[in-house]
Image: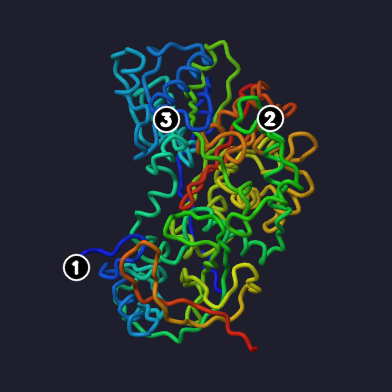
Amino acid sequence: MTPPQFPLPDTEWAPAAPFWAAAAAGRLSLPRCDACGRLVWYPADACRRCGGAEQTWVDLSGRGTLFSWVVVHQQFLPQYEPPYVTALIAINEDPAVRLATRLVDVDPTEPGLVIDEPVVVEFGRLRFPGVDGEVPAPFWRPIRSS
Amino acid sequence: MTVDDDWGTNIPLDDIAGKVAIVGVGESEHSRASGRTPTAIAAAAVEAALVDAGLAPEDVDGVMLGPGVPDQLDAAAFHAHFGTRHELWESQAGGGMRWAATAPVPAAEALARGEASVIVNSFAVAWATQRGSMTGGPGQTHAEERFKGNLEVPFGWFPQPVYFATIARRHMHQYGTTEAQLGAIAVACREHANATPAAVMHGRPLSLDDYLASPYLAEPFRKEDCCLISDGGAAYVMTTPERARDLDRPSVEVAGVGLGRSHAGTHWAQQGDFTSTPQVFAGPAAFAMAGIEPGDVDVATAYDPFTIVSLMQIEDLGFCPKGEGGPFAEAGELRVHGGSLPYNPHGGMLSHAYVLGIAHVVEVVRQLRGEAANQVAGAEIGVYGGYTGPEAATLVLRRSDS
């Protein structure tokens, strides 16, 4: 299989392949250290906290908080279409682990976001103009009462 | 929120206080796209530094350059440029960024072992020229990194302005920092560049109103929060304090060096303390080696790719309490005229030139010799904060006669 075109992720890249495979099945999954129970992310052979070498991929609740975000106005790459909102999400099960994402259901011109507000995963597809193919991926959206 | 307090560490360095003198500094012309190669730019800077030191190319027996940086002035390029053929000690633990601060450590070892007696460290970039052909530049290496390419770039969390705008937003939340306070840093640096004829932004004033009226690039960042991309280089000449006394030039001695490292490397998304820099691990070690406190510093410089990186380093080096960098900048404390901590008096990477910090060291040396274009009156102790992201280093310099 030919590697996907930039900036799509290479879902066959071994360290993160289970992350992308889970996303394709609508699940959010990360490796957890068997010894100390902390999530090991980004992928590493040994747990950064306790040095444990054994890990198990586990499904997560898909709940988190909005750690920080940016509204991108500049077109940094021809494949990106500004404006868009990119963010880091702190995972409820281990808030020291943060996932980079794009927020959905947020208007870049009026984002109305609040740091640390609760967010929930929403699976969608990464697509880029002029780039062949698409990749199922976890996006996130604010949990709002209205 | 969980913060792991062991998110980074101090890397112990040899005590080199008083063992290295800087006896010459030089810069190339700093410009927008110029068509020059980095090697030619570095050679021009080294030539200027040798003239400044009153030394000939034959007097140089050691060269330092950046690790893994293409087209720098290594021993072969030095000989090709100057037409020399003598033996040259060479080290790739030099160049810009944090190495512009730590190069004196391997230099001290080479001087002590007699492997070299006069060592020149240089660094140059031609990224303004290369940007036209979409090669090189600060974004490319990050796009090619596997973790970022797999987990960050696909979501548009890329490149550097986006990482650091995310950090700025979190800093604002944690400490109440405002856009106008970031703007105060950009404005102070521009004022300093306006007083520095060699600065790329000389003659181009920036007011806080101009800053606030400027459109967002990666909100909360505007263009003026981000450093220049320019062509240029700089160099400095190191020798022993004994040799320095024989040269008829005011010299500056290395008083302290410190090095800190973040365990998250360039993966800022996972950095335990998201709104700090490894200067928290580097600064105290450098100040202890120099036997000084942050309050003793007369002039400070720091590697400033973005306003927020200046602000965090000013806090992390102990020049103000953590979280108070914004009000500190807003009160004008960073200004050469009237501020308590004259900061990047040449304009820094925001407004002087994008030479990845080595021009900051050149500036500190000129300040301590009393020869800077935008001089801080009576400066005796100066600091350079070097930064790569994964690492930060602190260099304390002192006037040799002080």
Write down the quadrant of residue A137 in the picture.
bottom left
Front position among marks 1 and 3: 1
Write down the quadrant of residue A57 in the picture.
bottom left
- B110 or B65, which lies in front? B65
What kind of residue is marked 2? Gly
Sequence-first tag of 2 and 3: 3
What element does badge 3 sit on?
A: helix
Residue linked to disc 1:
A1
What element does badge 1 sit on?
A: loop
Crowding around mark 3 (Cα neighbors within 10 Å: few <14, some 14 to 19, many 20+) is many
- A116 or A45, which lies in front? A116
In the image, is residue A43 above or below residue B53? below
Residue at (75% x, 42% y) in the render = B207
Residue at (58% x, 43% y) in the render = B288
Residue at (54% x, 66% y) in the render = A84
- Residue B127's spot in the image, x, y percent? 44, 37
> In the image, are marks 1 and 3 on the same chain?
no
Residue at (36% x, 14% y) in the render = B82
What kind of residue is marked 1? Met
Q: Chain of mark 1?
A: A
Q: Does residue B130 show up?
A: yes
What element does badge 2 sit on?
A: loop
Q: Chain of mark 3?
A: B
What kind of residue is marked 3? Ala
Residue linked to disc 3:
B107
Residue linked to disc 2:
B203
